[in-house]
């Protein structure tokens, strides 16, 4: 969660944070005093520049036990563009660390000492120079307090690290990348070991799973053998990595948020998703145009939510009249290769179907063509929770 505030308010917040020792901003005008106070608990490093002499202060982490960092719990170095791998070589000495943030940094490899952070709960590596490397992840099974891992790069991890991943019994949030190209071992072996570890995580605490794939991954990645099913899972995001929706997904009673891409969407995919009793948000994207008309069947998707639908012209009746709890719908009509007037006909058909619904849902209908840059794939259904 983030927000924007006026510069004056920001200055006031920083000042009060320093006074209360809530967070230490580095660098700041107070940096000299707080670095010697011995009471730093949360450190936010917001700028590093070799020319300005900021980098030399980071190696003090290597003397953390004697240099006043004994109680440091939070270390955030997001957007530090000149941060280097060697600056973190003694990170293991920050024995009380619970949060380590390295978003949008050039870090490509973490030291093996990362496994010494026994109390670390969140490791955020999103949009780093390279998600992780083999040496980054080996030993991760020792980090038993870890609750959030973002991001785990399967491609550059060893089989051993994939197996160790399943030992993180307290992990609630996992963000991972799957790229079959450049993988250092057999793709099937990687898939099987990953699914095995996911099964162990799903039987413990896993609540949110994000998988970032690539188009080339759609043919060689599968979650069909996930067992036991992740009964506590609430949020599932799988971008450009699945060929089909796993059959077991429809049995997850706690799942409320689904955002997935498949190779070619089919009616079975929609039927499986329609079984989810507490679904509030759904986006189903298709890399290739469906070969059949997709219909929302009666008794499916009974939770109250807002739908955003991207529909191809020629498929005017997709069952919107069966969404009895619908309150708002945003419909984008794909007019690529449509004959004159077909887009208007689709809009009229959707309006007629929605009129029969008991909640008289509001409609926002737009038409787009191949010239529109923001609609590149054959996305089909996207929903958003109604508050």
Image (cartoon, grey):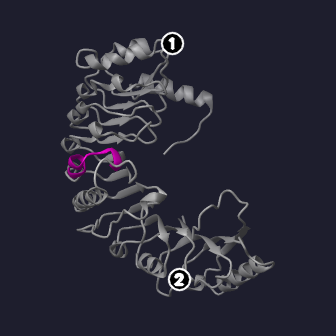
Whether 324 is among the magenta residues is: no
Specify whether residue 385 is in view: no
Horizontally, residue 99 falls left or right of residue 216, namely: left
Mainly helix, strand or loop, the magenta region? helix
At a point 40% along the width and 32% down the height, the residue shown is: 107
At a point 40% along the width and 75% down the height, the residue shown is: 276
Numbered badge on residue 296: 2
Tag 1 secondary structure: loop
Q: Is residue 49 above or below residue 319?
A: above
Q: CA distance from mark 2 to mark 1?
A: 60 Å
Q: Closer to the camera, 234 or 34?
A: 234
Q: Is residue 77 above or below residue 344?
A: above
- Could you say where residue 172 lies in the image, as x and y percent from the top left? 31, 53
* Quadrant where the C terminus is found in the figure: bottom right
Q: Closer to the camera, 120 or 139?
A: 139
Q: Quadrant of residue 139?
A: top left
Q: Closer to the camera, 114 or 304?
A: 114
- Could you say where residue 79 lies in the image, as x and y percent from the top left? 49, 31
Point out the stretch of residues depicted in magenta.
154-163
Residue with the mark numbered 1 = 52
Q: Is residue 155 above or below residue 294?
A: above
Disc with the residue nearer the chain's start (2 vs 1): 1
Neighbourhood count class around disc 1 (C-alpha, 10 Å): few under 14, some 14–19, many 20 upward: few
Neighbourhood count class around disc 2 (C-alpha, 10 Å): few under 14, some 14–19, many 20 upward: some
Specify whether residue 339 is in view: yes
- Could you say where residue 335 lies in the image, as x and y percent from the top left? 72, 72
**How many numbered marks have been drawn onto this rendered protein structure?**
2
Q: Quadrant of residue 73?
A: top left
């Amino acid at each position: 969660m983030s927000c924007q505030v006026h510069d004056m308010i920001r200055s006031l917040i920083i000042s009060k944070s320093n006074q209360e020792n809530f967070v230490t901003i580095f660098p700041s005008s107070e940096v000299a005093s707080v670095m010697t106070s011995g009471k730093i608990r949360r450190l936010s490093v917001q700028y590093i520049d070799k020319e300005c002499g900021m980098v030399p202060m980071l190696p003090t982490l290597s003397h953390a036990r004697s240099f006043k960092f004994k109680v440091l719990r939070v270390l955030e170095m997001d957007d530090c563009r000149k941060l280097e791998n060697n600056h973190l070589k003694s990170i293991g000495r920050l024995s009380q660390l619970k949060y380590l943030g390295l978003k949008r940094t050039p870090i490509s490899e973490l030291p093996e000492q990362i496994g010494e952070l026994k109390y670390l709960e969140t490791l955020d590596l999103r949009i780093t120079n390279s998600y992780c490397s083999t040496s980054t992840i080996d030993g991760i099974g020792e980090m038993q307090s870890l609750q959030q891992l973002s991001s785990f790069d399967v491609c550059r991890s060893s089989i051993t690290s994939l197996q160790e991943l399943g030992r993180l019994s307290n992990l609630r949030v996992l963000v991972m990348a799957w790229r079959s190209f450049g993988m250092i071992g057999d793709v099937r072996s990687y898939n099987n070991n990953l699914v095995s570890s996911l099964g162990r995580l799903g039987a413990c605490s896993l609540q949110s799973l994000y998988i970032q794939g690539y188009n080339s991954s759609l043919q060689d990645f599968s979650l069909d053998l996930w067992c036991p099913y992740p009964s506590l899972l609430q949020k599932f995001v799988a971008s450009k990595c699945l060929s089909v929706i796993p059959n077991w997904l429809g049995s997850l009673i706690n799942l409320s948020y689904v955002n997935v891409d498949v190779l070619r969407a089919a009616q079975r995919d929609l039927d499986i998703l329609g079984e989810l009793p507490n679904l509030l948000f759904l986006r189903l994207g298709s890399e290739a145009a469906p070969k059949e008309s997709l219909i929302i069947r009666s008794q499916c998707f009974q939770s109250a939510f807002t739908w955003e639908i991207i529909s191809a012209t020629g498929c005017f009746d997709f069952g919107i009249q069966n969404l009895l709890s619908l309150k708002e719908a945003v419909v984008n009509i794909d007019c690529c290769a449509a004959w004159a007037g077909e887009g208007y006909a689709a809009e009229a058909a959707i309006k007629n179907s929605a009129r029969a619904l008991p909640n008289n849902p509001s409609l926002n209908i737009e038409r787009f063509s191949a010239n529109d840059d923001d609609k590149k794939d054959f996305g089909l259904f996207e929903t958003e929770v109604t508050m």
